[in-house]
Image (tube, rainbow, N blue to C red):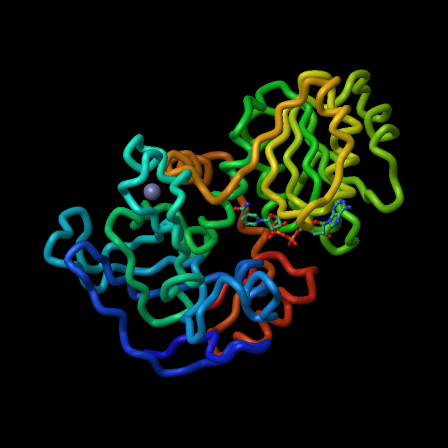
Amino acid sequence: MRALVKAKAEPGIWMENVPVPEVGPNDVLVRVRKSAICGTDVHIYNWDEWAQKTVPVPMVTGHEFVGEVADTGSAVTEYRIGQRVSGEGHIVCGHCRNCRAGRGHLCRNTLGVGVNRPGSFAEYVCLPQHNVVAIPDDVPDEIAAIFDPLGNAVHTALSFDLVGEDVLVTGAGPIGIMGALVAQAVGARKVVITDINPVRLDLARKMGIHHVVDAANEKLSDVMREEHMKEGFDVGLEMSGSAGAFRDMIDVMNNGGKIAILGIAPTGFSIDWNKVIFKMLTLKGIYGREMFETWYKMIALVQGPLDVSGLITHRIGIDDFQAGFDAMRSGSSGKVVMDW
Ligand code: NAD
Ligand code: ZN
């Protein structure tokens, strides 16, 4: 089969012919229809420090996908050939304490599809049946293809009660905008999103986020005045990975505020911990999606009030993968969805 392979320990990604993955007794083989490019794939493309220490080469990359079941192992009972599916890209061990308690997203032994094992930038991807998620007929392929990052956003946004709350989202990348849309969909009072990239700020405006703030030129204290918010934000969603944005957020949280942190900031960055203490803030780190509660809630949201299709800025054929990676590497695209 054809696949986009991290074939060499240097920047780039290469289209190669590789064997179709072997289907074990518990596995489902998925014929990929669409697969989207994630920031993680860009790290792997760029071959940065994280990628060098994490990804063995050669590796078939990609983990955001939708497709149809092409084959099932002898022990698979839940899926049938031809069924439309996506899948959770974190493969968990099933025997650690958290897994046994039904908290798979907290597994210490998580392996990543397209990172530690062959991924979805390929004609076929193989997953344990536990990780497969059936896609209802009324969810379009291109939306199911971005369920992985949408799940990150839903997991982060639904970490705290948002109903009637004032919510600050730092970072208007695809995931930050999705998080802001989720907050608006579930009944937050005011939703404010910040970025420093004019293209991303425009995308957030186009997607209908209530208040879009250029953090390079505007002060959040002024925004609070405009929004008649006297005390501060109730909930923060950190989606930028910028230490500066996180510090700005801590400054404008109300006492007792709650912050969910998805963005990955540089190792060892500093904040004023005394503000966390005296404001009695709650900080929660977020990794991946809750298994599988996030998937249930995310599917219900897109079947209902949540429309994220405007975030897909590039719909391309797989032979144009280089253009897709170039768009993602520019830092100004929305989601890039590739057709297999
Ligand atoms: P992205 O890089 O496309 O978006 C981040 C945005 O933050 C950019 O638009 C950037 O301009 C903006 N930004 C930078 N500095 C800022 C500042 N000072 N103030 C406000 N905005 C600022 O990333 P994404 O794909 O949307 O993902 C969001 C974050 O989540 C990234 O840090 C990513 O690495 C991380 N992530 C974490 C997980 C996890 O499981 N924890 C999963 C996926 C992504
Ligand atoms: Zn485990």
> Is 121 rendered above or below residue 206?
below
The residue located at (25%, 62%) in the rendering is 29
* Residue 249 position by quadrant: top right
The residue located at (57%, 61%) in the rendering is 50
Q: Is residue 289 visible?
A: yes
Residue placed farthest to the bottom in the image?
Answer: 17
Residue placed farthest to the left in the image?
Answer: 74
Could you tell me residue 166's position as x and y percent? 68, 24
Near-viewer residue (109 or 146): 109
Instruction: Tell whether 90 sits left or right of 183.
Output: left
The residue located at (39%, 64%) in the rendering is 119
> Is 283 rendered above or below residue 228?
below
Near-viewer residue (268 or 26): 268
Instruction: Tell whether 82 sits left or right of 335.
Output: left
Specify the quadrant that holds the C terminus. bottom left
Specify the quadrant that holds the N terminus. bottom left
* Residue 182 position by quadrant: top right
Could you tell me residue 107's position as x and y percent? 38, 41
Could you tell me residue 52's position as x and y percent? 55, 67
Could you tell me residue 39's position as x and y percent? 58, 58
Instruction: Tell whether 63 sits left or right of 45.
Output: left
Near-viewer residue (180 or 63): 63
Instruction: Tell whether 326 sits left or right of 156.
Output: right
Q: How many marks?
A: 0
Q: Is residue 137 visible?
A: no
